[in-house]
Each structure stands twice: as structure tokens, then as C-alpha cells.
Amino acid sequence: MVTTTTTAESALCERSREAEAFLDSRQHTGPEVVSACEGWTAHEVTAHLAAAAAEVTRHLVPYLAGEPVPRTRTFEEREPAYRELGDAELLARLEAEERRMRTVIGQVLAREPDAVVPWTGRRMVVAKFLPHLRNEFAIHRWDLVGDDDISDQLLGQPELTEHAVGVLGQILVRRGRERDPSPECDLHVRLRADGAPDVRLVVESGQAGLHLSESPSDEPYVELDAPARTLVIWGRRPEQRGRFRSYVDQPTLHRLQALLAGY
């Protein structure tokens, strides 16, 4: 029997631009360089990505075999073994884990395009792991090199913003809620970028999250270019001044920045 591979399935097996860009940046960034991801060096960021890819595979291999999917391990459980590797070995391991993850995702989606698995205490559409890791590689590349043309190209992609808001809309404000200066007060503020739907930051009835909206509104807002907005959603701040402009009062801006602390 001859097995054919569709163009879509072949694309799943290709390394993303974001992963390629991160790996290239690591060739020019020493492992000891302190990144913009608080508390982590370039080596530790790399360990985080390798462990994430391996954790996805750890879930999908038993799923393919019809076996129970294990509990998702925390960062603290899955990353130390990778941090202990020498940097050259770690980089090789990241490439291998990322490649294996794409292969297994492709196998799952070829059999079951709408597959869903348990992940971090919730349900995750398997196809969503691909944009999730693309976001991670793009954001963590910026953590190493900062604002540049490649970061702008990668972080400005609409599908990455859509994934971050649609899948991680509550998770991306979870840590920020711990430092919310007005936790009992409702909040509605928009993050606008030209040519793209607004991202709404909403705190209401004790719940907080991000939402996409294409509806016009007179709600308070801030303006950013698209790549800068992605950074802010993930708890970062663009290096170049002028990319983030506020049209809200000082307490609202302070609260928005506190809530968007990343995770």
C-alpha cells in the first residue's frame, strides 16, 4: 500500500519560521546572557522551550496509542533536567524535541484533525499546539535580541495574536491579577493596532481575561503597533519608545500594565 502525504500534512513537519529564528539567535547569544524573561538566562529560556516541546510529545504519544494521557508537569518538574545539560547539548536537544513534537502532532492530526487532549488542567485542541509554540519561540527570541526587523515580522502576525487571546486569554492575566491594584473594580480597556481587531482587557464580576473584538466602541483604549501589542499581551514592553501610546487616565494605565504581567 502506498501512503501519500498531503501538502497540509507536509507543512506540519516543517520547522516554523519562529523556531528557526530562535535557534539562529542562540548561535549569537551566549548561554549566560540574561534575557528579558525575568529570572532566566538564554540557557534557561532554551531549556524552557525544549521541555515544552517534550511535554507536548509526552501527551500525544499515549493518546495515539489509545492510552491515558498523563498529567501535565509544571515548569519546575520538567525543566531542571534540561537546564543541567551543557549548552551545546541543550541546543541539540531542543532541535530534536521540537522535530519530534511536530512529527507526532502531524500523526495525530492526520488521523484525527479535531483531536483534543487534556493539558494543564483544561482541554487543548491538538492543532493549537503549533501556534502556541510559534508564539513561544517568537516571544523568547525577542527576550534574547529585543526589537529588530525579524521580531517585528514574527510578532506582528495576526494568527499569533489570535491564538494568544483565544486560547490563553485568561491565563495571560492570571499572574497579573495577583498584583491588581483594584481587584474588586470592573475594567474595560482596549488595546488597538491598525488594521487588526481590538484586544479587550476585561475584568468583570471577579473574572479577568482578554478578548478579540471587531465591533467599534468608545471604551477607553491604548494604541500600539501590532508587534508591540503582542509583546504587551505577553507581559513584555517594547524597547523603542513611541510604540505604546496611552489615551486612558493614569490609574487605568497602571492597572492595565499590572494585569498584563505574562505568565
Image (cartoon, helix red, strand yellow):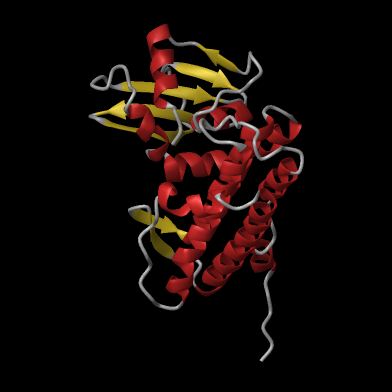
Rendered view: 102 above or below 21: below
Q: Which residue in the rendered view is the most extreme toward the bottom?
A: 1
Q: Tell me residue 85's x, y (percent).
A: 60, 53
Query: Which quarter of the rendering shows the N terminus?
Result: bottom right
Q: Is residue 157 at all visible to an observer of this figure?
A: no
Which residue occupies the foreground of this view, 51 or 67?
Answer: 51
Horizontal and vertical percent position of residue 158? 60, 39
- State the residue at coordinates (69%, 34%): 151
Vertical comparison of 165 with 121: above or below: above
**Quarter containing the C terminus:** top left
Q: Nearer the viewer, residue 25 or 7?
A: 25
Q: Quadrant of residue 139?
A: top right
Horizontal relation, residue 44 to residue 179: left or right: right
Judge left or right: residue 143 versus residue 80: right
Q: Is residue 177 left or right of residue 81?
A: left
Q: Can residue 105 be spotted in the picture?
A: yes
**Residue at the extreme top:** 250
Give the residue drawn at x 68%, y 44%.
Answer: 22
Front residue (pair 178, 125): 178
Q: Residue at x 56, y 30 (%)?
A: 231
Q: Position of residue 88 (x, y in %)?
A: 70, 52
Residue toward you, 143 or 149: 143
Residue at image point 67% right, 57% down: 95
Q: Describe residue 151's horizontal placement relative to residue 72 as left or right.
A: right
Q: How many marks?
A: 0
Q: Residue 123: x and y, percent?
A: 37, 56
Q: Relative to 218, say whether 37 is above or below.
A: below
